[in-house]
Amino acid sequence: MALNWNDKCQPSWSGDELKNIDSNAYKFNQDPAGKFHPSTQFEAVKVTLDEPEPDFIWHLTKQGDWQKNSIHNVCNFFKGYIETRELYNLLRYNTLSQNIEFIRRPEWISKHESITAWDDNDANAVMKTLSTKLAFNINKNLIHDTALAIAHENKYNPVINYLESLKWDGKPRIHNWLTEYVRVTETRYTNAVGKLLLRAAIRRTYDSGCKYDYMIVLEGEQGIGKSTICEILGQEWYADLSLNVHSPDTIDCMRNKWIIEVSEMECTRRADTQALKSFLTRRTDTVRLAYARTSKDFLRHNIFIGTFNPDTAGSYLKDMTGNRRYLPIAVE
């Protein structure tokens, strides 16, 4: 005040007067000091610091160089890459189909294309992106291995998700559901077979590869709903397959299925009895997946339901030792 403003006062104030004015300003003021300072007219700016890079542990060579072909390193790099691209949690692993799946549309698939399970095209797209945009060159097999490792961190089973979403209304049905919904005469045998079928389907889902040697066969005229009940039970994981026990394509078609219908027991007419018996009681299936370089054994997670029209020529009951595996149910 003394340096910048006092000279403009007429007459100027003395030093004692200035001190008294300054003292009174603090003594009798009604607003906090600095209320009208220019800085109070602006909102504070929130400073956002860049997020630190993930603290990954890298595998190095004996010379201390970065191991280019280490899946551990590629996993780290891939995770860091997809985080920066806002694609974190892009992949998941379907334990029913044994496929790597996309949780949402990746950047290399246009909105006009359908999204399928992870395959060579996706590996090529990732490899191209890493090479052209990030100057990071690795082979396609390592991309596949990396995608599998990342997807395995996010496993799920769609059938389990479906079953656990259902809510029971408290009404018992399992003891005679074949009679109530499939028009089957109620006996101790049909009730037992009905419970066995449902329990086997659930057990194979939660305990894949568990022992189950039977195939229930729904016998009845054409058009009375034998296939319909199979489809209702299996939902979107139902399939009507022509079983060729010697073909690897059969195993591949079974991967994403839970309830498999064997229409008109057609397989019993083509396959030799011993091979069919062995196939039905098998607890594991050997499959070479599309992204895999070798075959692998997978625990069986599905059950078979046969359908048969007794009016057709022939019978599926051909072998006395194998007949015990078929449990016929007459549908009226």
Image (cartoon, rainbow, N blue to C red):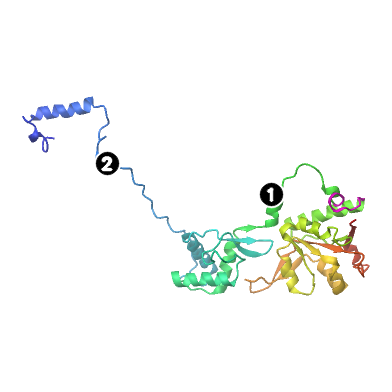
Left or right: 236 as drawn, with respect to 331:
left
Which quadrant holds residue 309?
Answer: bottom right
Q: Earlier in the sequence, mark 2 or mark 1?
A: 2
**Amino acid identity at mark 2:** Ser
Dot 2, crowdedness within 10 Å: few (<14), some or many (≥20)?
A: few
**Amino acid identity at mark 1:** Ser
| Residue, far left | 11
Which quadrant holds residue 277?
Answer: bottom right
| Residue, far right | 320
| Residue, far front | 223
Q: Residue at x 65, y 61 (%)?
A: 94
Give the labeled residue for mark 1: 165
On-image quarter of the C terminus: bottom right
Give the labeled residue for mark 2: 39
The picture places residue 325, in percent across and down from the top left corner, at 87, 63
Stretch in magenta: 178-187
Left or right: 271 as drawn, with respect to 102:
right
- Could you tell me which secondary element the residue under label 2 belongs to? helix
The picture places residue 83, in percent across and down from the top left corner, at 49, 59
Q: Residue at x 44, y 69 (%)?
A: 133
Q: Is residue 307 visible?
A: yes
Q: Is residue 79 above or below residue 18?
A: below
Using the image as rendered, state which of residue 73 and residue 298 is in the foreground: 298
Is 113 magenta? The answer is: no
